[in-house]
Image (cartoon, rainbow, N blue to C red):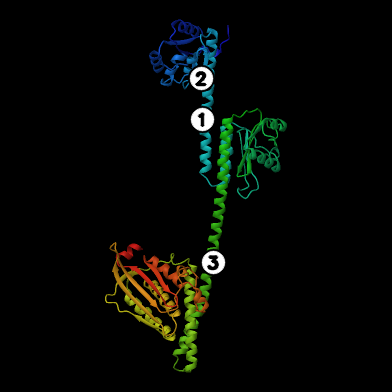
């Protein structure tokens, strides 16, 4: 009698379905004799009822009844009895879920043997799938931990610990090579109770790189029993893994593009280890995530270092400019005070010629003071960091004050400034000092760029926008040299100066409009420039009135 696997003594249930009553009885008797609990069915309806009511260990079914299985709820392995001389039965014996076939009528001993073997095979497959799913779940956690950090060392530590615990290894080592894409790091893990691998037990860096390059070129892993020749016979020809004292090792390349970045060694010190294709696939997947994480983390860390250095340089620049501005303003204040004393002295009046020369010195001193103030604004990183002192401000009154302060300069240039009267002087919520700086910059620019005999008109009005918001608009129009259409989009760029200003040697820093725009933006307004080369320029400043200004801020 054919030997039957010992585990058939475990409780097993077999469903036997056959329209032939005599064959059904013989098959059922053979399985009962082998220790099975047998449930019988003679047609499709009874077979479906049995499968829905029971959870059999195996289903032995005639080919003509096998079609019922696709609609039944059973997940048991299926052995189909088929007449190989009958093409119709062969065609019928191919529904989904069939695991094996046996010629009918089967010999009782063969039936018992094939049934038991089928149960064992399916059981092992299911166990393997469950084990693979368990490994996959554990390694998902490793990949999640890798994605959750930007620290290269933490990424490497997660990988070696994850591989070690998942595959019950003795030692796992990850090492990267000299490469601009990743940092040079090493991470190791060892099973509790074992000492860490000494450095000399690991392959030399050149050999490790050669192994990784060879494997990466073939997109493979390389396993061996510690014997290089044996390793070469098992995998693609190339350098074999060589960890001193290891009974079994696995080499996993880490790479990106056409070259490797590092290598992972998984070692068993006292036992051999055979790796399934599913395990190798999971290992390579995690190694790919590790490579991506190491590259990304290296890029992020490099960018952070650059940003940090730029911030330090920016702070040094700001500190330097602030110091220089302070050192320049102190003597300049004294110079301006003494010039005022000399010009206003009645005890020792100066001649008319000297007075004219002093006027020139005063004007240039004032230009230098303005330049220092502009540079100070730039050194603060613009006006975004400056607190605004908001208060109600009469716009018409502010324009009159600016025009009055700049008329002497305009007179020297033989330029006329006209401020249109404002019937109802609108009140806006603003920082009066900063607002005066805006209009001073704009009117000063108009004076500088308007030839002798020219004219500057300053006007303002209030209006309501389509959305119901109320605005005050100030227009400063001159008959100056204008700006070309190619350059007008750059006028708010810091330190930018139009080509005709450069060619005409008109003094300036290119900061006035940039600073003015910063201030207007902070007040919730907007500033626009329209110009025609050789004809003149109009600058329009729009500021929200009343509560609209407060909301903008």
- Label located before the other in sequence (1 or 2): 2
Residue 521 screen position, x and y as percent: 39, 66
Q: From the viewer's perspective, is 543 left or right of 330?
A: left
Residue 155 seen: yes
For disc 2, the marked residue is 99
Q: Which residue is mark 3?
A: 317
Q: Position of residue 455 (x, y in %)?
A: 39, 82
Looking at the image, which residue is at 51% across and 10% down? 104
Mark 3 Cα-neighbour bin, 10 Å: few <14, some 14–19, many ≥20 = some
Image disc number at residue 235: none
Residue 515 placement, left or right of 187: left
Q: Secondary structure at mark 3?
A: helix
Residue placed most toward the observer, 142 or 513: 513
- Cα distance between the residues tagged 1 and 2: 22 Å
The image quadrant of residue 257 is top right
Report the front residue among 350 and 242: 242
Q: Residue at x 54, y 61 (%)?
A: 312
Q: Earlier in the sequence, mark 1 or mark 3?
A: 1
Task: Name the mark on residue 133.
Answer: 1
Q: Secondary structure at mark 2?
A: loop
């Amino acid at each position: 009698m054919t030997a039957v696997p010992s585990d058939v003594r475990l409780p097993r249930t077999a469903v036997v379905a056959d329209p032939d009553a005599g064959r059904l009885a013989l098959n059922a008797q053979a399985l009962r004799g082998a220790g099975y609990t047998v449930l019988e069915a003679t047609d499709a309806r009874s077979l479906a009822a049995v499968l829905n009511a029971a959870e059999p260990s195996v289903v032995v079914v005639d080919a003509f009844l096998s079609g019922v299985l696709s609609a039944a709820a059973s997940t048991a392995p299926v052995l189909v009895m088929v007449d190989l001389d009958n093409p119709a039965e062969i065609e019928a014996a191919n529904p989904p879920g069939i695991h094996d076939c046996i010629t009918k009528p089967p010999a009782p001993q063969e039936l018992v043997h094939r049934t038991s073997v089928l149960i064992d095979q399916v059981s092992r497959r299911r166990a393997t799938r469950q084990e693979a799913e368990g490994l996959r779940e554990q390694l998902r956690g490793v990949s999640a931990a890798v994605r959750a950090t930007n620290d290269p060392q933490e990424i490497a530590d997660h990988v070696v610990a994850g591989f070690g615990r998942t595959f019950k290894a003795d030692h796992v080592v990850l090492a990267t090579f000299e490469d601009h894409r990743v940092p040079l790091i090493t991470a190791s893990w060892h099973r509790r109770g074992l000492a860490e691998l000494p450095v000399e037990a690991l392959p030399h860096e050149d050999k490790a790189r050669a192994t990784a390059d060879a494997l990466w070129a073939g997109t493979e892993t390389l396993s061996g029993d510690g014997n290089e020749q044996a390793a070469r016979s098992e995998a693609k020809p190339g350098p074999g893994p060589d960890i001193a004292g290891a009974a079994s090792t696995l080499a996993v390349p880490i790479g990106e593009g056409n070259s490797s970045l590092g290598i992972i060694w998984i070692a068993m010190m006292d036992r051999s280890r055979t790796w399934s294709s599913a395990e190798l696939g999971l290992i390579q997947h995690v190694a790919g995530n590790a490579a991506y994480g190491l590259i990304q983390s290296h890029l992020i860390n490099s960018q952070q270092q650059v940003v940090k250095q730029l911030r330090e340089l920016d702070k040094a620049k700001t500190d330097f400019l602030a110091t220089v501005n302070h050192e320049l303003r102190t003597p300049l204040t004294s110079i301006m005070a003494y010039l005022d004393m000399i010009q206003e002295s009645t005890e020792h009046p100066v001649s008319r010629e000297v007075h004219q020369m002093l006027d020139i010195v005063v004007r240039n001193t004032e230009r230098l003071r303005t330049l220092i103030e502009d540079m100070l604004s730039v050194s603060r990183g613009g006006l975004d960091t400056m607190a605004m002192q908001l208060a109600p401000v009469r716009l018409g009154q502010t324009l009159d004050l600016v025009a009055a302060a700049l008329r002497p300069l305009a007179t020297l240039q033989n330029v006329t400034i006209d401020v249109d009267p404002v019937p109802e002087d609108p009140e806006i919520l603003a920082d009066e000092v900063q607002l005066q700086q805006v209009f001073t910059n704009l009117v000063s620019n108009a004076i500088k760029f308007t030839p002798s005999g020219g004219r500057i008109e300053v006007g303002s009005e209030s209006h309501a926008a389509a959305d119901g918001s109320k605005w005050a608009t100030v227009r400063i129009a001159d008959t100056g040299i204008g700006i070309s259409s190619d350059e007008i989009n750059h006028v708010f760029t810091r330190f930018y100066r139009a080509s005709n200003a450069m060619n005409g040697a008109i003094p300036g820093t290119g900061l006035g409009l940039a600073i003015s725009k910063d201030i207007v933006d902070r007040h919730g307004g907007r500033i626009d420039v329209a110009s025609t080369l050789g004809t003149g320029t109009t600058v329009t400043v729009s500021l929200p009135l009343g509560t609209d200004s407060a909301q903008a801020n």
